[in-house]
Image (cartoon, rainbow, N blue to C red):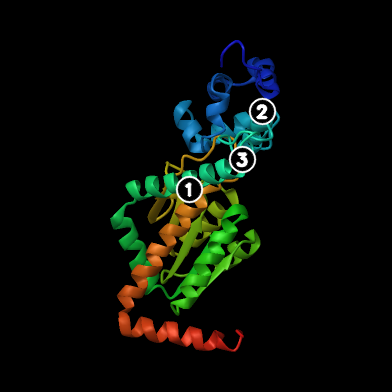
Amino acid sequence: MSSTDRIPALVLKMKALFSELNGSEQKVVSYIIEHPEEVIYLSVSDLAEKSGSSTATVVRACRSVGMKGYQDLKLNLTQNIVTPLQSISEKINENDSITVVLDKVFSSIIHTLNYTRDVVDIKAVEEAVLLILNAHRIVVFGMGNSHGIATDVQHKFIRLGLNVVAFSDSHLQSMVSAHLSERDVVVAISHSGSSKDIIEAVKLAKTSNAKIISICNLGNSPLSRISDVKLFTASNETKYRIVALASRHAQMALIDVIYTMIAMKKGPDDAAKIFNKVEEALEHLKF
């Protein structure tokens, strides 16, 4: 930070408490003090790597300075640093016209899609398609901003005749995870890859030998590390939005690729029968 920058209140608090922290916690807090705006953009594992510590140490350090955890710390830093307009989009100015806002939002989405296309692991997509196609049961986990994406996965896979259910309640996620088997597949969606509820449910599913497919933003996140198949989006998401926006389009694009590949593998005749059966089932609901 330059000397002209307004120092966030949380940073001042961390400086005051610094001497009371142990050595490993001081390494974490030192990095946060020196790079507060960067930290807003980092996952817990990213910060652990950059500060030369562990994720557990990062969480302990956050609690030692009065935060509930890492996400709470990032939220407090965000509120200290950014303007209300930046919390919507850091690239939009208060005097922008509707046309300019339209262009900036669409440009962000297009950039995210192109960026994700460049980093897609084709082998991982193929592995995900085969796992889903051969699964006895598919469960999809997504919470908060990822809930809508999880529901979209359920909707598309049902159209393909697959046995799939999406869950956004942490209790239900844990309950269903306890009953999975090696024949089942979990699709876990989390932009940060650090959602505690999702990770706990996935860990439980792994004890039953269920296969895990994760969809996260590019990086070494806690969720991606415990997944069998890792699908990454690559969104240059604003540093200041806790809720990822443009990345949702990249997630849905990956899902559409998987949907299309499964339909192709079923063969044109079988796929046509499935689609026609669905349309017939819905026909009485339309005018």
Q: Which residue is mark 1?
A: 109
| Amino acid of disc 2 | Ser
The C terminus appears in which quarter of the rendering? bottom right
Vertical position of residue 237 compared to residue 124: above or below: above
The answer to which of marks 2 and 3 sits earlier in the sequence is 2
Q: Is residue 235 above or below residue 171?
A: above
Q: Note whether residue 212 is visible.
A: no
In terms of image quadrants, where is residue 84? top right
Closer-to-camera residue (170/263): 263
Image disc number at residue 97:
3
Q: Are marks 2 and 1 in contact (CB under 8 Å)?
A: no
Task: Pick out the residue farthest to the top.
Answer: 3
Relative to 268, 33 lies left or right: right
Q: Position of residue 30 (x, y in %)?
A: 55, 19
Is 223 rendered above or below residue 282?
A: above
Which mark's residue is nearer the viewer, 1 or 3? 3
Residue at left 45%, top 31%? 49
Label drawn at residue 64: 2
